[in-house]
Image (cartoon, helix red, strand yellow):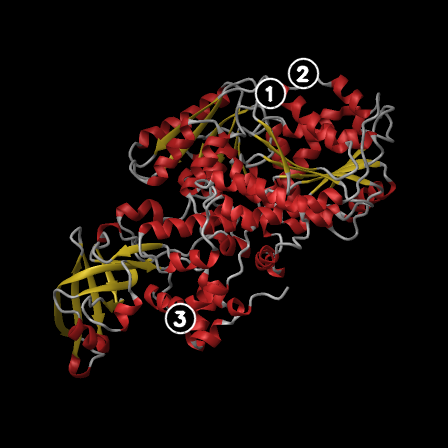
Amino acid sequence: MDLVPALEEPLKKVLGPATAKVMAEHLGLHTVGDLLHHYPRRYEERGQLTHLADLPLDEHATVVAQVADARLLTFSSPKAPRGKGQRLEVTITDGSGQLKLVFFGNGVHKPHKELLPGTRALFAGKVSVFNRRLQLAHPAYELLRGEDVSETVDTWAGALIPLYPATAKLESWKIAKAVQTVLPSAQEATDPLPESLRAGRGLVPLPEALLKIHRPHTKADIEDARSRLKWDEAFVLQVALARRRHADAQLPAVARKPKKDGLLTAFDAKLPFTLTEGQQKVSKEIFDDLATEHPMHRLLQGEVGSGKTMVALRAMLAVVDAGGQAAMLAPTEVLAQQHHRSITEMMGELAEGGMLGGVEHSTKVVLLTGSMGAAARRQALLHLVTGEAGIVIGTHALIEDKVQFHDLGLVVVDEQHRFGVEQRDALRGKGKQPPHLLVMTATPIPRTVAMTVFGDLETSVLDQLPAGRSPIASHVVPAADKPHFLSRAWERVREEVSNGHQAYVVCPRIGDEDDDPKKSKKKPSPEDEAEKRPPLAVLDVADQLAKGPLQGLKVEVLHGRMPPDDKDVVMRRFAAGETDVLVATTVIEVGVNVPNATAMVIMDADRFGVSQLHQLRGRVGRGSAPGLCLLVTEMAEASPARQRLTAVASTLDGFELSRIDLEQRREGDVLGQAQSGARTSLRMLAVIDDEEIIAEAREEASAVVASDPDLEHLPGLRTALQALLDEEREQYLEKG
């Protein structure tokens, strides 16, 4: 079906080339349809003035206010003719506060005539600070003359003034005028919602929703429009995911059932502990999936340290038992090496297939990373193609064309949020038939985000910690307010070491020349100091600790720019207990498992996200001794950053923290910033607040796709899907 011509009309034909160019370059709007879906951020009431007290610094803001005072000042200036320059200072007020507007040079004449005391107008510009006072320099403005039957009144007709997401190049009211121009085309918008769904939920038709969102007469109009447009976004997204699930379910796969007394049985018999109830339940879900002739697509969410690797390993062994091979894809070399080491240790002689000492039910476990030497790499590739190696663990080097498998049956992807869907699919393409897929993440994901970002996967959750895990105490260390707390933190590290344990110190930056921020020449004010100074760096902090508070202890560094062999050596020494304190970047965030490490000090903790702090903290308390995590910050007690840290310190529940994290971040961050689709598809829907709509949309979408997989009877829905999944945005959903 052809796309609706009126909505596909390029903006440059409707608005003129200059405006269309700015809209395309700065707002990503190219067609009439794009502009109609560029919704107002909020609305101003004609009689209600914006609170100037709430203006965001360094952002473009639009305010409705009244001129209280205007002064034309003359000052000496070498650039001005006869050495005199002019500056117009206008003070505006809204009853809650005041704001200064400044105009210079030739730009003073028009506002000097128009911005007289008592005049009301819309003002737009970037909020800055001068002499410790907020100001707008050279703001654009639009006079509001209520009694005047002019274009302005037509443009701002109705009780509510829409304020749009704008840029320095294009103010909100210019966008509003452009929207007025294209609004008649809204009548031709094809409705993506099936009529039965729309009527059953009492939602207004799409053309009416577009009219009400851009030209509401009442607040009820806005609510009607929002309810409808949220459903569009949730439903179209869920249909895209339901179609992917449906297509995957049609693919053939080899059923992989473990042998009765094979490798898995031998492995389970060696285990020195019993699996948790959760591990047994999730393993059953996975084994049931593996036994079917359609590929498994499962997301395994597990709290840090809940034993996901054990569950994944048992799934891999079941596939090897059934004559297939399993590949585990890790996001970093450190993590791939760590997994390889821990899996071969757990398997013991069962990982020595074909070697002296290997037992009857054994296989080879090989490592494949980009930095391996040519000979070792050749050997690993040979073991894969012959089928000698049942299990391979590697980084994205596994995806390269040269890598061939004898019979790939299962792909395990660790830390899914680090991989794009293309990488995932490239590895799946290595099988003779589509292999089964298990995706693991230790970042707890609220249910709605799982339904939105990983909506093509069935979900399993491990929320029990294995026996023998210890609780972790977390505390905020306010280094600026109470320096003695920081001194005490280093004493605590020494105490842990003297008790035979080890510690991590985490910093946001490496500290070599490449990542050193440009030194600012301007001296920051004391209150800016904590935010403006460069984040603390591994190399500097390690040096200071070794010479200062941790003198005499064995301190080593680990970061991403070290050669892979060096990283491995450092990790091995730390794992063997030869190093007391490891000063590292977030390379230790996932998968690093050293049960003897009991303390972690996170420097500049406010520079990390909530989920990241939770991940880092999960590196301690992995053995029988209790863990300690100290969050060091210079942020003031009342700051949002400190409140975030207090939240992390107050709970070990990753799902609760991930919810807090999402509430504090923009939706775009949730879906990953690299996706072009995130910006265009979620304008109205909020994944946390609209949990109910997303869950209901998923059910409706599954039913629609089950009865009409090709959407033959829903042309409007097909059109909306094409717009969402055009080539450039295809499957952005899983790139998070």
Query: Relative to residue 360, is residue 287 drawn left or right?
Result: left
Residue drawn 77% across the image and 34% down it: 292
Q: Nearer the viewer, residue 474 or 322?
A: 322
- Judge by depth and name the residue closer to the eye, 710 or 412: 710
Pair 3/1: label in front: 3
Circle 2: residue type: Phe
Give the label on residue 181, or none. 3
- Give percent across and percent down for residue 675: 55, 54
In space, the residues marked 2 and 3 are separated at their CA atoms by 70 Å
Residue identifier under label 2: 273
Which of the two discs, 2 and 3, labels the residue nearer the N terminus? 3
Give percent across and percent down for residue 330.
Answer: 66, 41
- Residue beneath label 1, please? 466
Q: In terms of secondary structure, where does tag 1 sit?
A: loop
Where 65 falls versus 575 (above or below)? below
Q: Nearer the viewer, mark 2 or mark 3?
A: 3
Q: Looking at the image, do the residues carrying marks 2 and 1 touch, with CB atoms under 8 Å apart?
A: yes
- Disc 2 to disc 1, C-alpha distance: 9 Å
